[in-house]
Image (cartoon, rainbow, N blue to C red):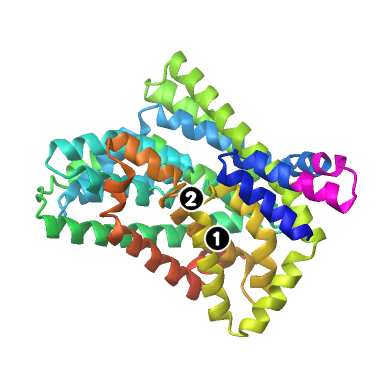
């Protein structure tokens, strides 16, 4: 009965449009009262959920990303990507994906990527004769790359949801190769659609232009090396690297590029505060929800159910992926990480899946959910930028979904794609 109250209250509130954080908190409170436990337990778990030092990295990484969005970094990265892949079939689509691969390593946010890259690329694509849905579909799906490569704050949330036992440095490095594979898969899909629609070919402008544009964008790109190299080498922690990222972002956008003004700085700060408040409230509420799941022995029960279904790890991971894909269509990413990690991670561990590998699977899977209706936040951002309806985008997004699903299958069943690079540092 307790589980019926917990999940029933949560689903009911979600269906009537209540914000996710309040759905989680109210469902936890209702269940606690039914169990006869003190209601203050909910608020204690909420407080302990956000009182984790590693969470300090999240607001600073978000702030650094906002500064970079407003500091002319995206335009310079697009120029570099254009010089490298703009001459391929559907050139601007390839540029869009390549720019997302570069910018994702700076912003760490799928929504920021879709807004910044899409805001610059989609209007250009329309002017050059590309269909709006093509530009939106590429922008939305390529934004997932930002979730996999450092500095992804969702990797930090996963580490904390797993009890803080998983190395953030390992998670950062584990997502690099899957992120690159996802980018290549999407580029193949973009090429296929561009060929089918007979989009134009551009000419290669020469390595001299590539070199000049790369040097121009190098100060912004260097942030990736600072974050990755510093955390991976142990020079500083993830929390310290986030602070360094903010200082370096201000240095580059104000003193080197001389693009960020006071108004942009204030807007970046306000946007970071809003996003951080939303993320931390969700994490805190989900912490109380997750504690109840553990209290009611849900993970252990799920392991037994899965064992009764099959003893084959391949089948179990398929079932987990399907469940996550379904959940990802109805809920945002941050609460799902906190809720599903305590449920599915013990199952994965029981069947021999490495926790770092599972983290990459989880992030990629839920990232796909950000691009699917009815609650795909990144899909909504892309459609707003491209000025088309969600239906117009989803009607033709199939090849890009296929590329993302193919990458998910590869990452799920070839653990070396996630674990090879972290293994080099051990």
- Pick the quarter of the image with the C terminus: bottom right
> What is the distance, in whole Å, between disc 2 and disc 1 at their CAs?
11 Å
**What kind of element bears circle 1?**
helix
Per the image, the residue denoted by label 1 is 362
Which percent across, then down, holds residue 43?
81, 39
Numbered label attached to residue 375: none
Q: Residue at x 38, y 60 (%)?
A: 182
Of label 2 and label 1, which has the lower sequence position?
Answer: 2
Q: Residue at x 65, y 45 (%)?
A: 237
Which percent across, then down, holds residue 307?
67, 81
Residue 235 visible in the current orientation = no
Per the image, the residue denoted by label 2 is 147
Label 2 or label 1, whichever lies nearer to me, is 1
User: Residue 275 lies in what quarter of the image?
Assistant: top right
The question of residue 31 being in magenta is answered with yes
Q: Nearer the viewer, residue 72 or 186?
A: 186
User: Residue 181 lies in what quarter of the image?
Assistant: bottom left
35 displayed left or right of 281: right
User: Residue 110 lies in what quarter of the image?
Assistant: top left
The question of residue 326 being in magenta is answered with no
**What kind of element bears circle 2?**
helix
Which percent across, then down, holds residue 139?
32, 45
Q: Residue at x 47, y 68 (%)?
A: 411
Per the rendered image, the range of residues in magenta is: 28-43
Outermost bottom residue: 311
């Amino acid at each position: 009965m307790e589980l019926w109250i917990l999940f029933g209250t949560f689903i009911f509130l979600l269906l009537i449009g209540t914000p996710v954080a309040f759905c989680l908190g109210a469902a936890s409170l209702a269940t606690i009262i039914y169990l006869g436990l003190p209601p203050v337990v909910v608020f204690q778990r909420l407080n302990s959920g956000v009182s984790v030092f590693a969470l300090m990295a999240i607001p600073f990484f978000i702030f650094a990303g906002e500064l970079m969005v407003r500091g002319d970094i995206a335009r310079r990265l697009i120029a570099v990507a254009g010089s490298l892949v703009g001459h391929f079939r559907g050139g601007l689509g390839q540029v869009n994906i390549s720019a997302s691969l570069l910018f994702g390593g700076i912003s760490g946010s799928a929504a920021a990527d879709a807004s910044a890259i899409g805001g610059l690329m989609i209007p250009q694509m329309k002017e050059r004769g590309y269909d709006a849905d093509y530009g939106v579909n590429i922008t939305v799906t390529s934004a997932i790359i930002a979730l996999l490569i450092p500095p992804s704050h969702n990797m930090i949330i996963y580490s904390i949801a797993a009890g803080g036992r998983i190395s953030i440095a390992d998670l950062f490095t584990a997502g690099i190769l899957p992120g690159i594979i996802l980018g290549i898969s999407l580029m193949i899909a973009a090429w296929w659609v561009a060929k089918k629609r007979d989009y134009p070919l551009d000419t290669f402008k020469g390595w001299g232009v590539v070199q000049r544009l790369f040097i121009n964008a190098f100060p912004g790109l260097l942030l990736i090396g600072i974050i990755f190299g510093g955390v991976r080498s142990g020079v500083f922690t993830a929390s310290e690297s986030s602070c360094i990222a903010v200082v370096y972002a201000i240095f580059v956008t104000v003193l080197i590029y001389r693009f960020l003004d006071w108004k942009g700085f204030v807007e970046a700060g306000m946007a970071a505060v809003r996003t951080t408040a939303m993320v931390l409230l969700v994490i805190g509420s989900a912490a109380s929800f997750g504690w109840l799941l553990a209290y009611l022995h849900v993970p252990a029960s799920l392991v037994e159910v899965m064992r009764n279904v099959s003893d084959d790890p391949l089948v179990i991971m398929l079932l987990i992926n399907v469940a996550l894909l379904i959940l990802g269509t109805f809920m945002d990413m941050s609460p799902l990480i906190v809720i599903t990690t305590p449920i599915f991670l013990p199952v994965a561990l029981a069947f021999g899946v490495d926790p770092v590998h599972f983290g990459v699977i989880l992030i990629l899977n839920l990232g796909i959910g950000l691009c699917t209706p009815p609650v795909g936040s990144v899909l909504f951002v892309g459609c707003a930028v491209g000025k088309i309806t969600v239906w117009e985008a989803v009607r033709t997004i199939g090849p890009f979904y296929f590329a993302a699903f193919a990458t998910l299958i590869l990452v799920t069943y070839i653990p070396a794609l996630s674990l090879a690079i972290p293994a080099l540092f051990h």
